[in-house]
Structure formats: C-alpha cells, structure tokens
Amino acid sequence: MKIEIISADDAKRLALHNLHSAESRTGSPKKKLLDIITTLGYIQIDTISIVERAHKHVLWTRLPEYKNEMLDELIDKDKKVFEFWDHAAAYLPMKYFRYSLPRKKMYAEKYKHREKKNKKLLQFILDRIAAEGPLQSRDFEETKKRGLWWDWKPAKEGLEYLFHTGRLMAKARRSFQKVYDLPEKVLPADIDLTFPEEEEHSEHLIMKSIAANGISSEKELTYLRHHNRASTRNVLNRLLEEKKIVRVKVTANGNEIYYSTEKMLRVLSHPEISSDVHILSPFDNIVIQRKRLQNLFGFDYLIECYVPAAKRKFGYFCLPVLFGDKFAGRIDAKADRKTGEFRIINEYLENNFKSDDKFKHLYRDKLAKLAEFSGCSEIIS
C-alpha cells in the first residue's frame, strides 16, 4: 500500500497547521472559539495557575480576543461544550458527547465495588442535587458519614465517582471548583446518546487525532485514551483500504509510520510558513505528547513542576517558545496578579537556535501580551 514521503519541515507544518490557521477563522469570537475546541478535540484543564490556567492559555494562544465569558456561555448557556475526561480532565465539544460513554461504562465496571459499599451516600448526593439543583462539594461539608473512599472527604469522592460514571455532569466551575448537576439538566434536548460500537469509537479517535494533529502515529492516535487496541488496528486497516486515511513517513524519522488524510496533506501545497512567536502553555495540545515533540521538532521538553527542585534544569514552570516552525527556547515565569508583576525567572534559548532582531521584537511583543492576559501590567526580569 502506498506510503507518502514528506520532509521533516513538512511534518512540522502539518503538526502546527491548526495553530497557524487560527487567524483565518471567520465568524464571531465565540464561534471561532467553538471551532478551535472542535478541531483540537479537547482542551486540557489543569489546576496549576503559575502563569494562567492551562485551558485559558491554550485558547488565548489561538484566539487573542478570548474571554472567559465565551467559554462559560458555550458550556452553560449554549450547551455546545462539556467537561469530562479525554487523556486528562478537559473541555470537549458537545457533538462528541456520545464518545464519552465508553469510558464512563469502563469506569463504572472497574470501580463497581465503590458503588456497592457506598450506595446510601451516592443516593443521598443524587437526591440532594435533584431536590436543590446544582451543588458544589463544599455544599456537602456538613456530611459526617464516613465510607470506604480515598483520602478526600466521602461526599467529594462520591461526587467525582458519579461524575466519572456519567450520573452527574459539571454544569460550570466557580472558583475553579465543579458545579455538579444531573445530566438531563445539562445536556441539550437533541443530544445523541446512542452507545458507539467499538469500531465506531476507534474511528472517532483516529479521525479526531488526525484532524487535530495533522499526522499521528498509531500510539499518538489513542494517547492515554480508553480504547480497544485490536479494534483500533482493524479500523486503521479498513480506513486505509477505503482511502479515508493514508500512511506517511517523515524522512528524518526512520521507519516510524504516521497517518494522515489526503485533505490534510494538501496543506503542504501552500508554502507559507508563519513567522510569529507563540509562548505556549506546558499543557498545550502541541507539546503534551513529549515523545512526538522530540521526534518531529527535536525539542526535548519536560514540565519540571513535578520534578524535585534539585533536579530541575530550567525551572518550575517553563513555557516553550515557538518561532515559526522551530522551538526557540523556554522561559520560567510566574504571574503575580496581586502586585501586577509578571516575573521572568529565567530565559533559555535552544543550542541550535540563533536569535535575531526579528525574533527579539516578536518575542518581547508576545511576552507583553501574555503578561497582560495573565492579569499583569509590568514585566520583571
């Protein structure tokens, strides 16, 4: 079967296509935002806010006019986005809701012993929300009953169990804490709730990954996602036979096989390459798969907030700096919103990157914009 051969530079362009094409999106800012979330397939949520929350930073990178109210409206008012789990906690397009059902079923089966041991507590939570409306974990602080849960208070763990099994949803977040409600109160009336067959689910994961990433290897297609491996391989072969996808090799990456589509590869017929600077979140969709990042860009990146201080090379919260299709360096930064100071703790350039006046100008301009977005008025270095 035919294999498309592309250069390393072409592979980078495909991987960055959705970042660099964001400027060409049309419509209202909120429509653009929904388009971005749908194309990427997910936006990761993370608790760390050293610079800015991960989902805000990722969306702002692609939509400079991003405002939190836009996302809030897409979730609560328009019911076009929902919160659940992708490879991690994430915001997902509502049109993909039914593909969250297999993981919910898996979770319920895997942890059914918790259900059995805590039936009364779980029913108590559901009854309260049914009677009182949306609630947060703090609304259950008076609950004294102890059950066989993890280290968190039992009601909090019960809420999360019901969330992961699909019997509760996150209607919104307040002070970054979930507001739980019954699914029938959160979901749009016309939502498709049919449970996807295994091969249908596999095809969704494959096509979603290619649309988001340009090219993906087999492991990248299902990275940390719940799926049936045999089904995924069967579907890959079927999609190849149906010519819905194509095999791709990158000249610099040996025998690694990637998958893409003819439509996506047509991007390469347009030679324009963005020369903008992007200061990315450590949880940005482009950098979250570290091995892929190393293979395609030669960029060895690790977020070091999880590394003991003595072993850190670059700092607690280093942000990758992208210049066009090359990673120029990384900066360790912290936004102090109380004082309005955006602190640059350290700045590093990659050994193979040569800075020039154009890069310096674009970098300083983007740094100022990131500081402002993070709630700071002054850069301190």
Image (spheres, rainbow, N blue to C red):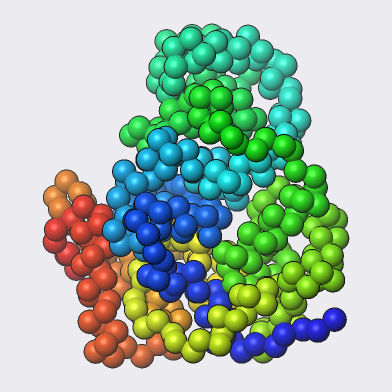
- The mark tally for this picture is 0
Q: Position of residue 266 (x, y in %)?
A: 60, 81
Which residue sits at x=60%, y=36%?
Answer: 191
Q: Position of residue 209 (x, y in %)?
A: 63, 62
Q: Position of residue 326 (x, y in %)?
A: 45, 82
* Quadrant of the rendering where the N terminus is positioned: bottom right
Res 220 quadrant in image:
bottom right
Q: Is residue 157 visible?
A: no
Q: Position of residue 67 (x, y in %)?
A: 30, 50
Which residue sits at x=62%, y=80%?
Answer: 265
Compared to 125, does 251 lie above or below?
below
Which residue sits at x=43%, y=39%?
Answer: 78
Q: Nearer the viewer, residue 306 or 257?
A: 257
**278 sits left or right of 374 in the view:** right
Compared to 50, does 132 lie above or below?
above
Which residue sits at x=67%, y=73%?
Answer: 260
Q: Nearer the viewer, residue 73 or 198?
A: 73
**247 sits left or right of 91 in the view:** right
**254 sits left or right of 121 in the view:** right
Compared to 95, does 62 lie above or below?
below
* Quadrant of the rendering where the C terminus is positioned: bottom left
Compared to 181, does 123 lie above or below?
above
Q: Nearer the viewer, residue 254 or 184?
A: 184
Res 104 quadrant in image:
top right
Q: Is residue 98 visible?
A: yes
